[in-house]
Amino acid sequence: MADLPLHDRADFDAAERGFIASLSPALITAADGRVVWDNDAYAFLDGDCPGSAHPSLWRQAQLCAKQGLFEVTEGIYQVRGLDLSNMTLVEGERGVIVIDPLVSTECAAAALELYRAHRGDRPVTGLIYTHSHVDHFGGARGVTGGDAIPVIAPAHFMEHAVSENVHAGTAMNRRAAYMYGQHLPRTPDGQLGCGLGMGTSAGTVSLIPPTLHVTRTGQEETVDGVRIVFQLTPGTEAPAEMNFLFPGRRALCMAENATHNLHNVLTLRGAPVRDARVWSRYLTEAIALFAGQADVAFASHHWPTWGREHIVTFLSQQRDLYAYLHDQTLRMLNQGMTGSEIAEAMRLPPALEQAWHTHGYYGSVSHNVKAIYQRYLGWFDGNPANLWEHPPAELARRYVELLGGASAVVALAGRYVQENDLRFAATLLNHAVFADPGDSAARRLLAQVYTRLGHGAENATWRNFYLTGAQELTGSPSKPATDTVSPDLLSALTAEQVFDSLASRVNGPGAWNERFAIDWHLTDTGEHHRTTMSNGALIHERNPSGNGADLTLRLAKERLMSLLTGDTDADTDTDTDGLDHDGDLTVLRRLTAVLEQPTPDFAIVTP
């Protein structure tokens, strides 16, 4: 920290610029009275940095906690600090265009109400989703009921928005509870936000499908009299994403492609690995396309950047950051270094290290480098010893036996704690806990080690992972606070996605001896699908040939969706439940009998 420009208050000035009013109290509740957002819980950040926090992360949390309505430039406003993301409002001829309506409907409605309290009761005349992550569309029904307004999104938005939250949604949501510290107290020794914002709200997630897709860079649209020029950026921070310029306002929206931190090439909650090379190239393109036409650049998180020179510097440094990590990782992996070795060796250029917005508050150099390695070479580091390792619990039992038993491992770990080698102490104690989850001494000491590692982390998501791990070692797993698999998302699934989701729930060994085929005729869409259970795999075909099905069902897509949500009862004697069919209806029971429900609170820090 001694080398960082602590005297530089430019970010604080920018984060407070254009302030109009805050939400007071900054407490948002659902219809049932449940609190879904409480930004006032972070009032303690007004104080000096304590010993339980990294000073750089404390500074970032102070900036992210600033909430309220802000003027970006004439006719463009942002509501910040009322969810993980920002909601931007662009005034048009008749009303206001909403960009990225937060995670939940409750927070989006509160943000719109705050805007209207100071800018008038303008109708929402357009909705724009910058990309396919839930914090940029989940609150849509909080600002509009789906009236006949344009809803604009990048190409393939629906495919990625829905698939991310359904296919591996349970596991991602469980890990997101760690990443965002959802169950940690908001205190100086607890959750300090997540670097990108303060956290995710716990309200109602919705989705209004787009009516207009951006399919190419240079595409122009006019919404409520406001001209918008788009840049399509697939494969960057999200698989479907876009930047765009408001030429009449000289304002550039950078979505989540350039924010005031190093972002994730691979999030700790899990996701497909992003392409740092492509990310960097799209930032170069954005500079060339838009920098000369913009006096302010804003994003879906954090605070804006004003002035052409500052915009170019900011975007250039962000570009160089991802390019450097990508290229240097490739250089070192081609010298034979593994992902973990590269992560230890990687150092940023001094000019980037000196810029606050390149710091790893949300992503980190360490896990981004490993992600780039993974993108090119996968999980295997090439060493045969690591090709067929025992799984964690089995490996742990053998290590603990070799080290002389659990008490010896705890004693050895205590020595490394004394020497301040917390990383290796965590490794030893993790073996002790996985060898015997009931060893209370090992659990307590590992919780202490995780707490110290968390308090020393500059990266907010690392802090949250460590502190949540400590919390669950001394307590029990907690269910995620946010349910991203909402009715809107489920209804947006294509039939293929429904069958893919069903296939991922089949207990393979339990279905080894099952063999049957079901034809599904969707009466409301006119689609014909066939699913065949074969060797424990549910095989899907669209518009199959032949009549080889054991059961033919004619049903609406909504009834098909009930299979995904767990409502799999079928009356085998009558059709009164809406299942018009030919053939053996017991086949449906045979299918539902081998479907398993995901486990939303599975163990992470214990076997």
Image (cartoon, grey):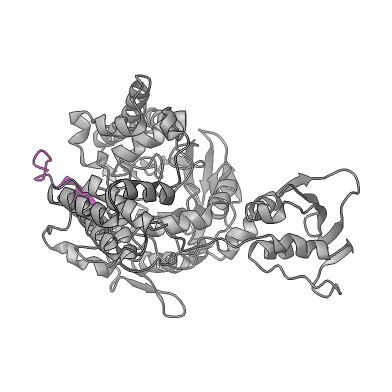
* Residue numbers of the magenta segment: 1-15
**Residue beneath the point at 76% across and 62% down:** 590
Q: Position of residue 315 (x, y in %)?
A: 31, 34
Q: Position of residue 149 (x, y in %)?
A: 57, 57
**Residue beneath the point at 33% across and 30% down:** 325
Give the quadrant of the C terminus: bottom left
Q: Quadrant of residue 30?
A: bottom left
Q: Quadrant of residue 424?
A: top left
Residue 564 located left or right of residue 437: right
Residue 1 located left or right of residue 238: left
Q: Position of residue 271 (x, y in %)?
A: 47, 45
Q: Please name the predominant secondary structure of the magenta segment in the image.
A: loop
**Residue beneath the point at 69% across and 52% down:** 499
Q: Between 511 and 155, which is closer to the camera in this rendering?
A: 511
Q: Is residue 266 visible?
A: yes
Rendered view: 442 above or below 531: below
Queried whether the magenta region covers residue 10, the answer comes back as yes
Q: Between 420 and 162, which is closer to the camera in this rendering?
A: 420
Q: Is residue 302 visible?
A: no
